[in-house]
Amino acid sequence: MEANKNKNLGNAGEFYVLAQLAQRGYIAGKTDDGQTLIDIIATEPDTLNTVNIQVKTRTIDGRKSSWLMSLKNEQAFEKLWYVVVEVGDDDVLPNFFIFSSKEVSDSIKQRLIDYLAKPKKDGTPRKSGGSIRHFEPSEEFKAERKNNWEIMFK
């Protein structure tokens, strides 16, 4: 049940992003689920500048302050952007934050380094971060990137 709920949340995030792009005049389409790092391909119609978008969605529930990523998100790509989505109540539009692939990559790598440098409660060193990564931008960075859709097409 939990996996289904997470997949539905991810799909909702992607469709919210598609709607936001369409509302702003961009041409956008969803890719096949889970095939690549690319969830959405979007084009600015006047310049034909095209970007690839990875969408990460989480709920605003007070339990999680980061977006779950994986080892593959550590690789930075020039034409890849992340739209991270915070979904709240059903009757409220989600929050959208836009970051470059390099910004996400640098952030999750640094967070892993910090995590591994901190010993466990019993004092023993941590061995590995596994394949799970967390993206947790500062509140200031989120404020700067909230609804900043144009940044992808510059």
Image (spheres, helix red, strand yellow):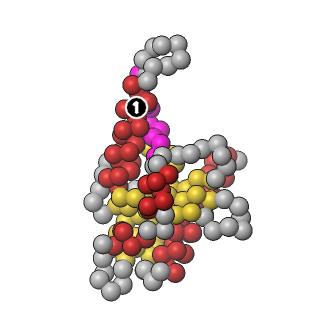
Q: Residue at x 52, y 13 (%)?
A: 122
Residue 98, located in which quarter of the rendered image? bottom left
Label 1 secondary element? helix
Quarter-of-image position of residue 49: bottom left
The residue that disc 1 covers is: 114
- What segment is highlighted magenta in the picture? 127-135
Spot the residue most to the front: 140
Q: Position of residue 28 (x, y in %)?
A: 44, 76
Residue reaching furthest bottom? 46
Q: Residues within 10 Å of mark 1 (few under 14, many from 20)?
A: few
For the residue marked with disc 1, what is the amino acid? Asp
Q: How many marks?
A: 1
Q: Is residue 4 visible?
A: no
Q: Residue at x 48, y 59 (%)?
A: 143
Image coordinates of residue 82 in percent, x first then y, are: 42, 59
Judge from the rendering whether residue 50 lies leftward or rightward of residue 33; answer left or right: left
Which residue is depicted at the point 46% across and 48% down? 138
When the figure is inspected, residue 54 is found, relative to residue 137, above or below; the finding is below
- Figure quadrant of the C terminus: bottom left
Residue lying at 55% horizontally and 56% vertically, measured from the top left = 57
Looking at the rendering, which quadrant does residue 46 occupy?
bottom left
Q: Is residue 131 above or below residue 117?
A: below
Above or below for 122 versus 47? above
| Residue 93 located left or right of residue 154 | right
On whether residue 133 falls in the magenta region, the answer is: yes
Q: Position of residue 38 (x, y in %)?
A: 41, 61
Q: In this orientation, does residue 126 appear? A: yes
Comparing 147 with 4, the one in front is 147
Q: Is residue 42 magenta?
A: no
